[in-house]
Image (cartoon, rainbow, N blue to C red):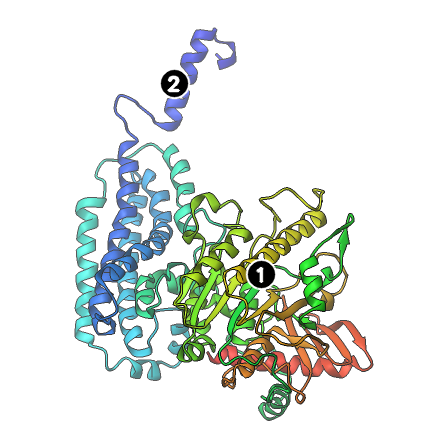
Amino acid sequence: MGLCRMPKPFRVAASCSFLGDMFNFDPAHLQWRPTMRFYIKYFFYWLLYFALARLVFLVFHYDKLDTNKHTLQEVALSFVHGMRMDASMAAYLSIVPFILYPFISKRFIGKSLKTYHYVVLAITSLMVVADLSSYKAWGFRLDASILDYMSHPKEALASTLTAPLGWLALIFVVLASAFGYLYARWVEEKTVAKIRAVLLLALPLLVLPMRGGWGVAPLNPGSVFFSAHPFLNVLALNACWNFMHTAAHKKMKKNPFVVCSEKELKVTMDSLTAKTNPAFYLHQKQKPNVIIVIWESLTAKMYNKQHKGVSVIPTIDSLSQNAVWFSRMYASGDRTEKGLAAILSAYPAQALTSIVKETKKASSLPSPVTALAQRGYETSFIYGGDLEFAGMGAYLRSMGFGQIKEMDDFPKEQHNSKWGAHDEFIFQKSIKTLQERPAQKPFFHAVLTLTSHEPFETPRPKKITGNDELSLFYNAHRYTDDCLKAYMHDLKKAGLWDNTILIILGDHGHRLPTAQSKIEDFAIPMIWTGGAIDTTFNQTKATSQTDLMPTLLAQLGLDARAFTFGKNALSAQGAEWAFFAFNNGIGYVNKDNAVVFDNAGKSVVEQRGKNPGHKVEIARRVQQAVVVDYLGR
């Protein structure tokens, strides 16, 4: 008889019986317990394994630990921070066992589960041992670059000959054997689990540790970096996860943008990046303070713009008439981390990748902090969001900043934006940080804003009304503009203005307001003001973010030769140009011409000026040079 034809009491009883059969759930016997017990123990089994592997790495490379600088508490923090990456790797390794376990009553599946685990344990132990050797031989944790070395096995083997192979073999045997025994005696469930519904709940729970948390930014190698001491950051990495991540994100093995010979390339780049002395100095101070405000999505398309009768960036508009204004400034890339590398390291954006996302490469970029610190400058960086995003935190720490403040350094009640703390709180933190420094020392200080990032939330009543995207975009920038005005007032009030060069520029441009032009989308403001600046004028030469640091260091009397892709924008000599890159495309601007080139289609998609066609070749040579340098790091 059909279920729908039964009397209601019988239909209810039959439904319960049906559900009980489907899920094999018997409250009297609690048959779900073996399954959940296995899931929990298996996940924590791998956490224990990776914690021990980190301890082995620490002992094996104990000579890298500076006991005068590294406290026991800091070493312990490497284990705490590294647990995020351990949990992520544990989650990936748990997927197959979580799926197979509810079906182990089937003999083939039961054997497959055991085989899977012991094979994975052997491979993981081999990677742990290879990591010990690779760090000793090459100075970096195991990553996918080892695959490149495998194509030259003789050289790769030669690099490991100094490693204590006997100890490495012993470590492999002990790890694999001990955790094989632990799995058989503690993790493996002897009770046959029949319930399968738990699988539907358990698998989605693995997503959270895989991503590394709830945050906007997924886990990346820089996520576990926390210290100014490189070895402690290296210790926090999980070698297996690092290998998996770099293999998944490994992109270019050779330069896909070769358009000329090495000799021709050198001639072109030498002519573009020749370092020259300033035509004049903007200040007369011996050691002026420097503040760089890096403004999220600050596009030049907002200059003197009103929306619904309200000025969008009135403070910037006013400063452009009363400061040093670089009116033809271009962002190097289209993302914040690309802007940071261009601003701080004079490193151009790449069309197919982002060097800041690759911790090892990013840490090799030139930094202004070392030279400034040697001159006695206090150095600091302030951001209200999560610096783990796109590897920015690891990059900034590799730059050597004395202090780095980010979202976790702000009170919880100030985390009122999707991205973290709004700009008013960022600027307040900046003032407090500068006031707490030794008063007699000059400072180099950078501030990165975030409120003008999508979704353009602001904590104050709107000055530009409307809920359409453009109105929200304009209102967010008006909010940051107001915060900047208050920040400059606070600098003066705190006595931090008179001896300071304040530089304001965008981290990148924006598609809004729509201009139907890549060239305009990459145009950004840059303004130099502050009490130390003793002149005002409009610098009309084409300038790039990559020129900021060479220009600033020249103004401070410091050597800028390490910043090979930048030029002095305040020199009377030298080439006038700016290069930018986006998703598989590039742009180039000089005095009279501008072009945008699509790499995929090998075609010019936008051009201006008298003779833009010839500039395509120069743009492509710059791109070739950038990728040559990128691949060599």
Q: Nearer the viewer, mark 1 or mark 2?
A: 1
Task: In this rendered view, identify the residue nearer to me: 299 or 280.
Answer: 280
Mark sitting earlier along the chain (1/2): 2
Q: Which residue is depicted at the point 59% across and 59% down?
A: 296
Q: Where is residue 25 in the image (x, y as percent from the top left)?
A: 33, 25
Task: In this rendered view, identify the residue nearer to me: 516 or 546.
Answer: 546
Element marked by disc 1: helix
Q: Residue 17 carries which label?
A: 2
Q: Which residue is depicted at the point 53% across and 68% down?
A: 291
Compared with residue 514, is residue 366 higher up or lower down, i.e. above or below? below
Element marked by disc 2: helix
* For the residues bearing labels 1 and 2, Cβ distance under 8 angstroms: no
Q: Which residue is depicted at the point 51% across and 86% down?
A: 561
Bin the neighbour count of mark 1 within 10 Å (Cα to Cα): few under 14, some 14-19, many 20 and up: some
Task: In this rendered view, identify the residue nearer to me: 555 or 585.
Answer: 555
Residue 288 visible in the shown view: yes
Count of marks overlaid on the render: 2
Callout 2 amino acid: Ser
Task: In this rendered view, identify the residue nearer to me: 461 or 188.
Answer: 461
Q: Where is residue 401 in the image (x, y as percent from the top left)?
A: 42, 69
Q: Position of residue 286 (x, y in %)?
A: 50, 81
Residue 586 visible in the shown view: no
Specify whether 161 is left or right of 276: left
Q: Give the residue pinned by disc 1.
A: 488
Q: Position of residue 463 (x, y in %)?
A: 69, 46
Specify whether 24 is left or right of 614: left
Which residue occupies the extreme right position in the image? 610
Compared with residue 483, is residue 249 higher up or lower down, i.e. above or below? below
Callout 1 amino acid: Met
